[in-house]
Image (tube, rainbow, N blue to C red):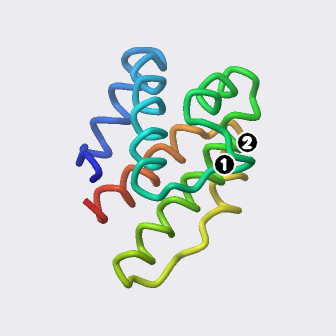
Amino acid sequence: MFTQKSVATVVILTIVTCGIYGLVWYWGAMHELYNAGGQSVAGLDPTIQFILLFLYVGGIFFAINADDNLNAVKQQRGLPPSDNKILYILLSVLGLGIVVMALVQNEMNQLA
């Protein structure tokens, strides 16, 4: 379901490649999350969400969708949901997308 990746590797590769790996990670994570949870804000396809990353609002859409999809997978497995949506949105708005990446990857690793 989810590909396990080291959180440290995701962060370090994003920094070393000046964000290029971060874009690759976002692309893969958006599709993995959508395929696993089936949730999407306003019915946006993951490809459209990725394009929105370049318009600043994409981070907010990703934050909402990531939390919704992670909670949908948790619900499917009978685990209690956690509401990290506000945290993810605030970090995205503050320009700390790399922290959101680390938190989401950690959640994905726990559910893998």
Of residues 103 and 79, the one nearer the viewer is: 79
Above or below residue 16? Residue 83 is below
Q: Residue at x 75, y 23 (%)?
A: 55
Q: Residue at x 48, y 33 (%)?
A: 26
Mark 1–mark 2 Cα distance, whole angstroms, equals 5 Å
The quadrant of the image that shows the C terminus is bottom left
Q: State the image quarter where residue 75 is shown.
A: bottom left
Badge 1 vs badge 2, beta-carbon distance below 8 Å: yes
Q: Secondary structure at mark 2?
A: loop
Above or below residue 45? Residue 65 is below
**How far from the left and from the top, in percent, is residue 110?**
29, 64
Q: State the image quarter where residue 59 is shown.
A: top right
Q: Residues within 10 Å of mark 1 (few under 14, many from 20)?
A: some
**How far from the left and from the top, in percent, is residue 66?**
54, 53
Total number of numbered discs in the rendering: 2
Amino acid carrying label 2: it is: Leu
Q: Residue at x 66, y 54 (%)?
A: 64
Q: Secondary structure at mark 1?
A: helix
Q: State the image quarter where residue 6 is shown.
A: top left
36 left or right of 67? Answer: left
Q: Residues within 10 Å of mark 2 (few under 14, many from 20)?
A: few
Above or below residue 28? Residue 66 is below
8 left or right of 95? Answer: left
Q: Which residue is mark 2?
A: 94
**How far from the left and from the top, in percent, is residue 21?**
39, 22
Above or below residue 96? Residue 22 is above
Amino acid carrying label 1: it is: Leu
Of residues 69 and 13, the one nearer the viewer is: 69
Q: Which residue is mark 1?
A: 91
58 left or right of 74? Answer: right
**How far from the left and from the top, in percent, is residue 72?**
49, 68
